[in-house]
Image: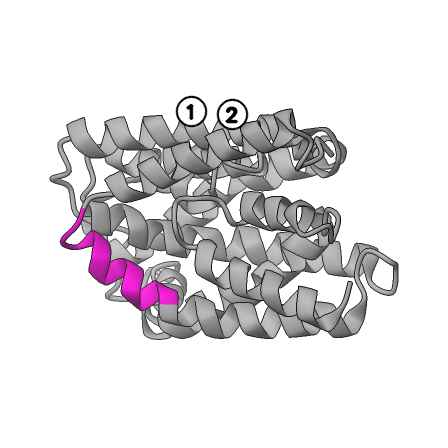
């Protein structure tokens, strides 16, 4: 992989990670479209550390407050109780991370091979795009993030776990689940950001330690892609939160459907390869 290829893949990662359109699918598609080959699950997971660093930077005050209150609530002498919304959010992040963590370990071989089939990716882009569209149009969207309980947090974690299939989208899975549970667009998006932190960080470092120094992770290009994904991702977070506070997700739904169809056409005419 050249530095230019890595830079462009980092740009794509930063632009798509937080939008409900699947960053892993776009990296897979663009890698094939420009004859760069499949960058691989390891490269994709590691450069996601850049976008997750953007999340940690953007939500730093919220993260510190949640962690601080969570630990304080463990002490019986503290004035902070388990009923505090920040303490509850800490538990939600922990419980919501379990599904993707367990399934990611159990299905790692399948994720890195079979599920990178572009026919699967295209189909998932379309199907889950339509599900997102239905949820966005017909859900109640009245609950705020502070009202979320552990059950809903776990269900959003299951939605996040669907992102192990390229094309679902980590944010798309959690946001869709949040909408179906009746949360506002912005609340679902914010929880999606927080819920992704441990899952992405653990996955990225797991792949980093597993493949560091191998052909799948060449240091220079991987570092370049990760830095670019951080910078671009940070900008996208602010833009996306402003967007969903006033607009619907329907534009992303149509985008997913169109991209899915184009990938199907590309596969049919040999412009894209299945693996």
Query: Height in image: 59 above or below 88?
Result: below
Q: Where is residue 96, by image quadrant?
A: top left
Residue under label 2, please give it: 123
Whole-percent x and y of residue 199?
55, 50
Question: Horizontally, is 159 left or right of 244 in the view?
Answer: right
Label 1 element class: helix
> Can you give x and y, in whole percent of width and height, for residue 242 in the image?
21, 62
**Which x, y percent locates residue 16?**
46, 54
> Element at badge 2?
helix
Q: Quadrant of the C terminus?
A: top right
Residue drawn 39% across the image and 58% down it: 74
**Which mark, by number, is residue 191?**
none
Question: How busy is the neighbourhood of tag 1: few (under 14 within 10 Å), some, or many (20 plus)?
Answer: some
Marks 1,2: beta carbons within 8 A: yes
| Front-most of residues 196 and 258 | 258
- The image quadrant that residue 45 belongs to is bottom right
Task: Locate the N terminus and report the quarter of the image it occupies.
Answer: bottom right
Characterize the local packing of mark 2: few (<14), some (14-19) or many (20 or more) Cα atoms within 10 angstroms. some
Magenta region: which residues? 236-247
Residue 127 - label = 1
In percent of the image, x 24 and y 66: which residue is there? 79
């Amino acid at each position: 992989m050249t530095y230019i290829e890595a830079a462009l893949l980092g740009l794509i990662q930063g632009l798509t990670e937080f939008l409900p359109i699947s960053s892993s699918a776009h990296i897979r598609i663009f890698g094939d479209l420009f004859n760069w080959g499949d960058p691989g699950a390891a490269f994709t997971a590691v450069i996601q550390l850049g976008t997750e660093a953007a999340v940690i930077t953007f939500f730093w005050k919220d993260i510190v407050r949640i962690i601080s209150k969570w630990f304080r609530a463990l002490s019986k002498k503290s004035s902070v109780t388990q009923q505090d919304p920040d303490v509850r959010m800490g538990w939600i992040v922990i419980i919501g991370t379990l599904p993707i963590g367990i399934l990611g370990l159990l299905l790692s071989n399948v994720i890195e091979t079979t599920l990178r089939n572009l026919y699967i990716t295209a189909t998932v882009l379309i199907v889950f795009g339509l599900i997102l569209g239905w949820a966005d149009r017909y859900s109640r969207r009245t609950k705020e993030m502070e009202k979320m309980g552990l059950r809903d947090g776990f269900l959003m974690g299951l939605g996040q776990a669907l992102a192990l299939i390229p094309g679902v989208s980590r944010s798309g899975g959690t946001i869709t689940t949040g909408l179906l549970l009746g949360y506002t667009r912005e609340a679902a998006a914010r929880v999606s950001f927080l819920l992704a932190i441990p899952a992405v960080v653990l996955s990225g470092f797991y792949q980093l330690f597993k493949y560091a120094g191998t052909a799948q992770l060449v240091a220079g290009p991987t570092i370049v892609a990760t830095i670019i994904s951080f910078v671009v991702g940070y900008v996208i977070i602010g833009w996306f939160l402003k967007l969903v506070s006033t607009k619907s997700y329907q534009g992303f739904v149509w985008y997913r459907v169109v991209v899915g169809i184009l990938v199907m056409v590309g596969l049919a005419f040999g412009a894209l390869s299945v693996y």
